[in-house]
Amino acid sequence: MSQPEKTNESSERKHFGITEALLVLIFLISAVGVAITDMSPDWGYWFWLSIVPLLAATSLYRSWKASRDRSESVFWILRHQIFHWLGLLGSLEIIFLLYSTNRVNAPEAGLFSLLTVALATFLAGIHFHWHFTVLGILLGLSTLLVAWVEASIWIVIPVSVVVVALVLFFSRRSKEKSI
């Protein structure tokens, strides 16, 4: 392998690591966003709006790097990226407008926000870089998981309380018999 090929390969690994780390961070903090929105929709609003610049900056960075390698127009990429991420901001604004007019409640606003971010991220992956497609799919699946947990929590908690009570009762009873 020639020296320029080695340099280009190590450079790509470095950029892949930065992008991947940011996408993992976004995935982890997005799960927290639904809980924040459930507890305080005002904080949730600002949380979701702050996710968009993080996603946009990561996507722009990745696209800019790719455009240099392929000699594409930075103006074209910037224009598409700006409209894409402004569309996500507009969608989030609509979700919280629906919340403020009592058309949706706080848990629904959190789920809708996560689903909207998932869709925008998935589409960014189709148009800009495949890493975002993977993140979009993971965010969409986490929306399903969060919705299931929220829907079943009122079943899981009482069952858990009963199970813990039974375990404590039988463990105490076995200790009394052994004495």
Image (tube, rainbow, N blue to C red):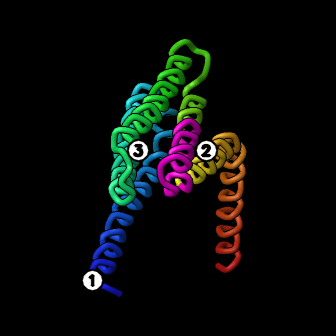
Which image quarter: residue 76? top left
Q: Is residue 107 visible?
A: yes
* Residue 99 x %, y %: 54, 20
**Residue at 70% from the left image edge and 44% from the top image edge:** 152
* Residue 115 x %, y %: 58, 39
Which circle marks residue 3 in the picture?
A: 1
Tell me the distance, in whole angstroms, between the alpha carbons under discs 1 and 2.
46 Å
Point out the frontmost of discs 3 and 1. 1
Point out the frontmost of discs 2 and 3. 3
Q: Specify few, some or many for label 2: CA neighbours under 10 Å numbering under 14, 14-19, or 20 or more.
A: many
**Residue at 61% from the left image edge and 21% from the top image edge:** 104
* Residue 53 forms part of the magenta stretch: no
Which circle marks residue 55 in the picture?
A: 3
* Residue 45 x %, y %: 43, 28
Which circle marks residue 143 in the picture?
A: 2
* Residue 121 forms part of the magenta stretch: yes
Relative to 163, is 107 on the left or the right?
A: left
Relative to 47, residue 20 above or below: below
Q: Is residue 40 visible?
A: no
